[in-house]
Image: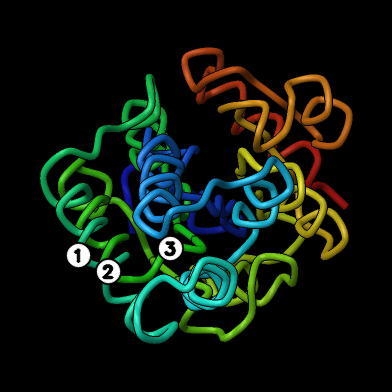
């Protein structure tokens, strides 16, 4: 299937989060959230920011409309979010340091790769295409497709199904502490990539995930694959 894949061995799968993990994009979400609150004459509290981190886009639309009166309806807020974010993902999104090189190394070694994200599919496809990840992925799944947020494992399970990998041989890569918890409870191996304290401090991520790094430049792809195969052994 890919160079380096061993036909007789069940494949290793890696499910990546997108924002804050593969893409350096969490800042624009925080920027947009603050901008929307400002447009409505309000300000986000630390609790609001924490809650927004775990929300889907429709949930965020409901939040801004209900709390701040933004837009004529939650659906109108979702449309506003779409316009704001599509411009960013299509033209300004960048990969996090070392991310593209790490993913390319896994791809060349026959690892099955996918993305599972809380972002809507149009943003994902635009950002992953703009930054060069898309051709290397077996699947891209949004929580919007599953109708369940990352507080539940449905989006990861769908990505794994599309990759065709066994649970014991599949890793979830996340920057958010709550998402690492979801993966662990569902039986996935976990790799945390630190982004910012809002998503989880490095100490918290290190304590929760099977492995943790500050960015992808701290990972050796061959060592990671060797470790993944070792922990998958019966």
Residue farthest along the front direction in this orientation: 41
Indicate which disc, 3 or 1, sits on the residue closer to the N terminus.
1
Q: Is residue 114 above or below residue 148?
A: above
- Contact (Cβ within 8 Å) of mark 3 with mark 1: no
Which mark is in front, 2 or 3?
A: 2
User: Mark 2 — residue?
Assistant: 80
Position of 64 compared to 40: left or right? right
Where residue 41 appears, as percent x and y from the top left, is 43, 54
Give the class, few, some or many, for how many residues have Cα within 10 Å of label 1's Cα (few <14, many ≥20).
few
Numbered tag placed on residue 161 in the rendering:
none
User: Mark 3 — residue?
Assistant: 119
Q: Which secondary structure, mark 1?
A: helix
Give the class, few, some or many, for how many residues have Cα within 10 Å of label 3's Cα (few <14, many ≥20).
some
Identify which residue is drawn at 51% across, 63% down: 118
Can residue 161 be seen from the camera position used here? no
User: Mark 1 — residue?
Assistant: 83
Which mark is in front, 3 or 1?
A: 1
Residue farthest along the left direction in this orientation: 91
- Contact (Cβ within 8 Å) of mark 2 with mark 1: yes
Indicate which disc, 2 or 3, sits on the residue closer to the N terminus.
2
Residue farthest along the top direction in this orientation: 218
Position of 122 compared to 165: left or right? left
Q: Is residue 99 above or below residue 167?
A: above
The answer to which quarter of the image holds residue 207 is top right
Marks 2 and 1 sit apart, C-alpha to C-alpha, by 5 Å
Identify which residue is drawn at 25% across, 54% down: 134
Front in this rendered view, residue 133 or 48: 48
Marks 3 and 1 sit apart, C-alpha to C-alpha, by 14 Å
- Contact (Cβ within 8 Å) of mark 2 with mark 3: no
Front in this rendered view, residue 6 or 68: 68
Marks 2 and 3 sit apart, C-alpha to C-alpha, by 14 Å
């Amino acid at each position: 299937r890919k160079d380096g894949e061993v036909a007789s061995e069940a494949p290793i799968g890696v499910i990546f989060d997108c924002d804050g993990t593969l893409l350096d994009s969490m800042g624009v979400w925080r920027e947009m959230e603050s901008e929307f609150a400002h447009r409505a004459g309000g300000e986000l509290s630390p609790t609001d920011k924490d809650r927004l981190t775990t929300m889907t886009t429709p949930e965020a639309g409901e939040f801004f409309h209900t709390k701040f009166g933004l837009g004529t309806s939650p659906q109108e807020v979702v449309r506003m979010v779409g316009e704001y974010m599509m411009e960013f993902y299509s033209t300004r999104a960048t990969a996090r340091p070392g991310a593209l090189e790490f993913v390319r190394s896994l791809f060349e070694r026959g690892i099955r790769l996918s993305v599972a994200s809380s972002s809507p599919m149009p943003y994902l496809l635009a950002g992953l295409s703009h930054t060069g990840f898309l051709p290397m992925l077996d699947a891209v799944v949004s929580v919007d497709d599953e109708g369940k947020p990352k507080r539940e494992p449905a989006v990861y399970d769908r990505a794994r199904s599309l990759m065709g990998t066994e649970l014991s041989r599949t890793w979830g890569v996340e920057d958010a502490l709550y998402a690492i918890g979801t993966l662990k409870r569902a039986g996935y191996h976990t790799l945390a990539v630190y982004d910012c304290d809002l998503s989880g401090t490095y100490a918290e991520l290190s304590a929760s995930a099977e492995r943790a790094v500050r960015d992808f430049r701290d990972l050796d792809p061959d060592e990671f694959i060797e470790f993944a195969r070792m922990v998958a052994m019966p």
